[in-house]
Amino acid sequence: MERLQHELDNGLTILVEQNAEAHSQALGFFVQTGSRDESEVESGVSHFLEHMAFKGTPTRTADDVNREFDEMGAHYNAFTSEELTVYYAAVLPECQQACLSLLADIMRPSLRQDDFDTEKQVILEEIQMYEDQPPFSADDKCKALHFGSHALAGSVLGTADSITRLTSKQMNAYFQRRYNPNNMVLAGSGRVDFENLVRQTEQICGSWPSVPSERTITRPTPSGGYQTIKRPTATQQYLLQMMAAPAGEDDDRIAAKLLAAIVGDDTGSRVYWELVDSGLAESACLAHHEFQGAGVYVSYLCCAPDQASENLKRLEEIYRIVEQSGVQQAELDQAKTKIKSRIVLGSERPRNRLFSVGGNWASRREYRTVQDDLRDVDAISVTEVHAVLKKYPLSGATTLSIGSLDETQGPGRPPAAPAHRASDL
Amino acid sequence: MRQVTQTIHTHSLGNGLVLVAEPIPSLESAAFSFLIPAGCCSDPPDRHGLTAFTCEMALRGAGPRDNRAFVEALENLGVERHESVSVEHTVLAGASLASHLPDALTLYSDLLRAPHLPPVELEAGRMVVLQELRAIEDEPSQKVMMELRRRQFPDPWGRSSQGERDALEAITIDEIREQYRKLYRPNGTILGVAGRFDWPQLKDHVERVLGDWKTVAFQRPQESKAPQKHAHVAFESNQTQIGIAYESIPYRHPDYFRAWGSVGVLSGGMSSRLFTEVRERRGLCYSVYASLQTQRERAGVFCYAGTSERRAQETLDVTIAELSRLAEGIEAAELDRLKARIKSGLIMQQESSSARSSAVARDWYHLGHVRTLDELGRLVDELSCDSINSFLSEHPPRDFAVVTLGSSPLQVPA
């Protein structure tokens, strides 16, 4: 593995983790833009724009884009999150030039009106689809409640209303504001011909104008609120909780991930033994998610409605006990083994490594090897887990419940949230 | 196609278990996949869900370890595991750092040969399988495809493993133990391994831990006709779910790649026909696909589309029209794209121990040998528009099973 890096005059960074042993390569544009960069009237535009990138450019129709990717046998897709929009393709090394030519071209899409109108219908269907599927957009709803007026509260998909009202002119303005070379990184992994990659990127992307794209990063003040949404036809009850946790740039984020694994990994954790192995819940888990300037623990519970109230109490009791008595060395060791194993298994394919290479650069301007990740996990002590738990306790969550139960049927409102610690950071 | 050096080792144990292994020394990991001939096709008529419940119980303690100690032993090896029950198999799969492979296989040999099936865990296990059944009630896209499979294949081959509530509530520990004794056996079990390992050591280890596992005689399940081909399931939701199926040929059939190629033209990359016509041109839905699903003796093409109620009829009409149009043949450019995608997919499969361990086990089950990349590459190269088109004219997509799920039924086009 070798790190190779180059920056164009207009600010576009190229970062590659070269692996001469690999059979394939993956390339991706990581644009630092997402729902947190949208105004209220633009809600959902980042994700809609991601779809529009595949609808053609001045030199390619939508059919051309799809056809050319398929002609090189690419495994390709795109996704949008709160703070990142990623376009990627995994191909055989001999297709590098064709792949970059296409990927770079769709970073300058035409955004034609008739394509915009047709694709709007697809986005509206996607919104409907998630409304029909568990957990019935509970994640969006919980995020809105937890983050309140903070930029991370917005939905990635937007709402049927915001998408219906959105105009192609607004999308164009958003594109001009966000898709600038200094606001993106071209990441690569696997068997990449770096010299040619740089030369070709200079040719295609060198003329993109450099306009500053800004993101305001403030620390959120989580609500700790509680909301029940009634959905009479749901069979199961779905509960989502969010609590403040270390942000993407905080050193204690690794300790937070280990804490989440000990307490609530989907197998072998405290939550697993209490709620899942026992069959009390269909699923129950705790995970750590990070953003720039913010982090959350997310706890998820899905069970029969008549068990929801008791299960929530059990979950809170697990959190209370770990806050009171801490974690054991043996639990930490087990969590480390598991996470390290996942890091190694998850890094074998260039298309998986790509997301680490691009993601770390986009969020932290950092390149991390697999060994860096393994070493940092190994270095965490019980003391550090206890420290992060003290700074970011698991109690005092923002809770959202969705299912056939209404407010009066429980699950009961959890104990009042302690004064929030976000301001201490 | 670019050459990737590939070796396939096989070893048959005296008791019928077959070990199929592919070394991939460039990887740090090793993965395994047990195909055990314990599918839900062997659920008794009034005990649908028994095989899945048995699998759930088999994980609750084995050999010298109780439930908790067993799972923790796997966790301490960092084994990423996965269990599932299909119509024909119980699949137990896992992956870990290469050095942990022998210890992981020892644990799984305990599970296969000496599960406790403890009465004290029965109610917890029952709650788990009931929870899984309940969760499907909230998954409209899964529900529609389950109902579709039931109407496409004769029983028991169209069943889903989750079973039925009444049966799950009635199952006793004795029934689970009996099901285990009947179905968990070395004759018919295939162990696929891929990744970094030393073949002589692996072979010796598997002989040591599974060599004296006793064989069990096996009876084939009785077949009965599938219910009527068209159905509507009333369901309150924003979108109408549409499932369409038609008969195809299984993996072991000499013409399989022609059938597979024709489905690849329908639904593969984003330039495929269904994606282009249903989603890209008309914006009718977000999700639309077709896939060729193969069992050993039969196969079907299963298509899915989900769309809002007012556009559901158009979506069904357009999708069926595309399926029917396939009989008119495919074009050279479509085939070229298909070949490119298949070939890069095959090469990229070499970068994942999990993908290869299940592929070698699956090949052995269907064919009694493993197709190397060279052989697959040759089969793909041999595909021509003519060969696919002559297949399509002999086997045009027709006699569709159609299941819809949503607030109102649709008109199935003639």
Image (cartoon, coloured by chain):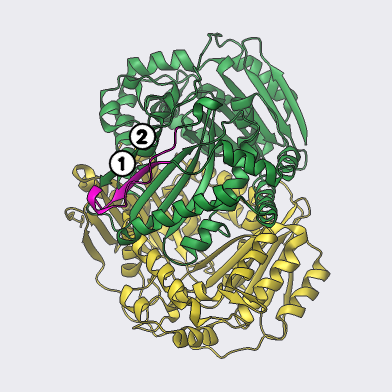
**Residue B394's image quarter?**
bottom left
Q: Amino acid at mark 1?
A: Gln
Q: Is residue A243 above or below residue A294?
A: below
Of residues B213 and B322, the one nearer the viewer is B213
Asked which secondary structure carries label 1, the reply is: strand
Give the extent of the magenta segment: A397-419
Q: Which chain is yellow?
A: B
Residue assigned mark 1: A227
Q: Chain of mark 2?
A: A
Q: Indicate yes or no whether the magenta region holds residue A410.
A: yes
Q: Position of residue A282 (x, y in %)?
A: 42, 60
Given contact means CB atoms under 8 Å apart, are the residues at marks 2 and 1 in contact? yes
Mark 2 lies on a secondary structure that is helix
Q: Main secondary structure of the magenta part?
A: loop
Q: Is residue A183 visible?
A: yes
Residue picked out by circle 2 = A145
- Residue drawn at 34 percent across, 83 percent down: B46
Query: Which chain is painted in green?
Result: A
Quadrant (top left/top right/bottom left/bottom right) for the C terminus of chain A: top right
Identify whether B349 is placed above or below B14.
above
Q: Amino acid at mark 2?
A: Leu
Local crowd at mark 1 within 10 Å, few (<14), some, or many (≥20)?
A: some
Decide: few, some or many residues near mark 2? Use Cα within 10 Å; few <14, some 14-19, many ≥20. Answer: many
Task: Specify whether A52 is left or right of B338.
Answer: left
